[in-house]
Amino acid sequence: MDNIVNRYNQNSEGIILPYKLIEEAYSKGNLKALTLFVLLKQRHRNGVIYNTSSRSIAENSNHSHSTVNAHISKLITMGLVERQIGKNGKKQLRLRGYKHYINRWGNSLVFIKFGTKFEINETLNAQIAIKHIRKQEYRISKKQGCNRILEKIVESPENYASLSDRNLANVMNKSNATANRIKKKWNKLGLITTSPIWSVLQANVTEAQYRRAKQVSAIPSYAVFERHSKRILIRKADAVEIGHNLGYKYTPNSWVPNMIKLKSITNNMNTGQIL
């Protein structure tokens, strides 16, 4: 399998991890420990930390000394790190490798690009939502063949994978406000790209009628007016794609994951404005 043969070429770019490992770490509150594991893989590509010291690890990974000790203990429990004695009799840490991952967590794989502590943690965190997006995309592709490019302002949300604040909150077990902040971070990092989908609330109205309706709360406060068509629109959902350029941004040159590539979304409207 080419993906397995080429995994050594990817060491300079990132690390391949099973999705079930990420899901398990998220559900048990060990995602920050897994972030440290990726940071250690980034720095120690041969999988061994010689003359190991939690203080040196803390300095190199932007963690505190106590946090490193706590995370290493979790990683040992998870079976990702082993303590061993080197030939010189000094303590070492061994970072478990690719074969160990797939034997324990299966071969549904995710590529995690190396970067800062924040970038790695958010990339791991986003995988839970990305899995949810892929499931939506799969159901849509089975229903209508493939996902259509969003060409018009008003479309049916059923035609596109969506990620509303409430939807993400349910997936991630967060509040709606927290989900909104998370989504903005992921957009900024390029992990996902969201665009609003609009529905017609009322047609053939003037701008004056729209303003009066808002003043008396006859329409939702988040409704917007489209000048050229004289329609009042409301935002129904956020269409979402994974990464940019019809694929996943965080993919190394040496390895292309087997995933459903989403169609680009051309709607760039700003919410809450008169259009």
Image (cartoon, helix red, strand yellow):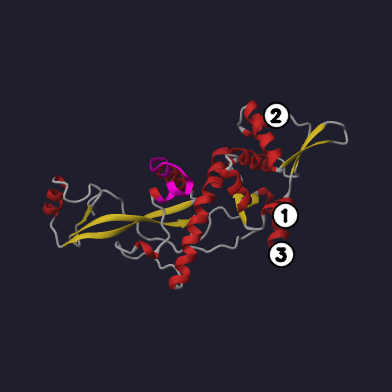
- At x 61%, y 30%, the residue is 63
- Number of numbered tags placed on the structure image: 3
- At x 68%, y 61%, the residue is 3
| The N terminus: image quadrant | bottom right
C-beta proximity under 8 Å, tags 1 and 2: no
Residue 40 appears in the picture as rendered: yes
Closer-to-camera residue (29/271): 29
Give the CA distance from mark 3 to mark 2.
37 Å
Closer-to-camera residue (180/74): 74
**Quadrant in the picture for residue 255:** bottom right
Q: Which residue is mark 3?
A: 1
Q: What span is in magenta?
A: 167-179
Nearer mark to the viewer, of 1 and 2:
1
| The C terminus: image quadrant | bottom left
Nearer mark to the viewer, of 3 and 1:
1
Is residue 206 part of the magenta span, yes or no? no
